[in-house]
Image (cartoon, rainbow, N blue to C red):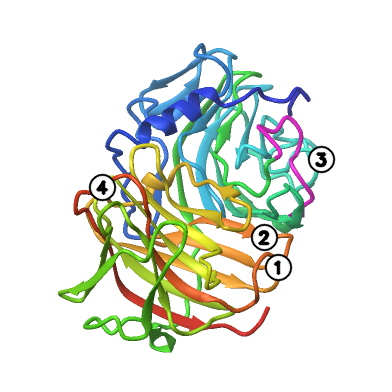
Amino acid sequence: MRDTARFVGLTVLACALALGCLLPVVTAQEDEEGWVSLFNGRDMDGWLPVRGNEHGWTVVDGVLTNSQPGVDIITDRTFTDHELQLEFRVPPGGNSGAYLQGRYEVQVADTAGAQELSTGMGGGVYSQVVPTKNAAKPAGEWQTYDIRFVAPRGDRDGNIVQNARITVVYNGETVIDNAELTGPTGGEMDRNVSKPGPLLLQGNHTFVEYRNIRYRPLKVDWPDEALFTPLFDGKTTDGWHTQETGHGTGGQWQVVEGVLCGTQDKPANGGLLMSDGLYGDFEIRAEINPDWDLDSGLFLRTSDTGAAYQVRIDYRPGGQVGPLYGEGIGGWAEDNAVWEKFYNRGEWNEIRAIVTGQPPHLQVWINGNLVNDYWDTEERLPLEGRIALQVHGGGDWEGRMTRFRNLRLLPLAEQ
């Protein structure tokens, strides 16, 4: 149960993520079933206080413990559609909560034996969804949550296009089954429902303990690879042509051992390598391995002037890989501040992007992790456009290259 005061800005998180663009990031490893631990059982690595630096959280005997009421804590990574498992223990009268994306509270409370079902009891989604039964164990016993969360879809103005949905299994019993959430539940971190968000554990009420906290992204039912058509033959640039844009006349492109490599012409001349074909609704898959300290991009529905929905490959200090940018269509950006959690430096990484509809719905994955889910609200470009690969102009790349391979595309039925 929450007070109604809004949280102030996430300054600490923002600073940490900014530093993450400059420092090496150790990515938590998946187990054989795809689960990733959010708590290492030793210290608070990966967790940040929401307000200020003072908080009552410690790690005792492998347990994340709010030893005295203080402030809430959040993970330094953010989530879209995912499954969450955790164990918790509350004392008599204990009260906490697990906020999905920092916005949707699944109640953690001592409600064993309660006869009247409510949104404020264990297993409920505070202020919105009443559990179908009281599955709570007595205070002082370890209890479990298995949660399945499908994130809301929002447009860039923050309007909800599709509400979130949630399933809660409480101590092995399904108490909420695919219920719709009409919005944040009160006391939320923010209301940016179209953005990924962290897991938040409430710590400003009573003593509470957590352990065995882990997540995995919801599995995507990807189309079979056999359905895709190669856009690049691995030998030549047949089917592609350079195009002059504001970044230059096109840059230099060559095929080296099955890899499409692009760099600048002198002096700092960039541009686009465009597909000859036009595409409307499609999924595109590509592997990328750019040199450090350059700016590139994968352009979707590109016009002949270079206007496009750009998946940025801005692999520089302070840059990001995976966010969307409105190239030549207003310059707006959909950030992906935690891209390094999913990106493998110096290795080949897979980008998957889907664009459908008009105005379009665009989704971007890095190595299978959804990092952008964006609904536009305007028709900025024609329904059909080209695929394009960018060499950014300006500066001096000193021979550094952007690299693409295994480009393939699957046309989709108009949405």
Foreground label between 4 and 2: 4
Q: Which residue carries the number 3 mark?
A: 118
383 sits left or right of 212 in the view: right
335 sits left or right of 389 in the view: right
Q: What SS does tag 4 mark?
A: loop
Q: Amino acid at mark 1?
A: Pro
The reply to whether the magenta stretch includes residue 358 is: no
Q: Which mark is residue 375?
A: 2
Q: What SS does tag 3 mark?
A: loop
Q: Please tell me which of labels 1 and 3 falls first in the chain.
A: 3
Q: Please tell me which of labels 1 and 4 falls first in the chain.
A: 4
Task: Give coordinates of residue 167: x percent, y percent.
Answer: 65, 55
Q: What SS does tag 2 mark?
A: strand
At 33% from the left edge and 57% from the top edge, which residue is drawn? Answer: 269
Q: Amino acid at mark 3?
A: Ser
Q: Nearer the viewer, residue 316 or 284?
A: 316
In this view, 320 is above or below 245: above
Q: Quadrant of the C terminus?
A: bottom right
Q: Please tell me which of labels 4 and 3 falls first in the chain.
A: 3
Give the overall secondary structure of the magenta segment.
loop
Extent of the magenta region:
180-191
301 sits left or right of 118 in the view: left
Task: Give coordinates of residue 300: x percent, y percent.
Answer: 51, 69
Q: CA gap, disc 1 to disc 3?
A: 40 Å
Q: CA gap, disc 4 to disc 3?
A: 53 Å
Foreground label between 4 and 3: 4
At 42% from the left edge and 46% from the top edge, which residue is drawn? Answer: 320
The reply to whether the magenta stretch includes residue 183 is: yes
In this view, 83 is above or below 220: above
Q: CA gap, disc 4 to disc 2?
A: 31 Å
| Residue 349 seen by the camera | yes
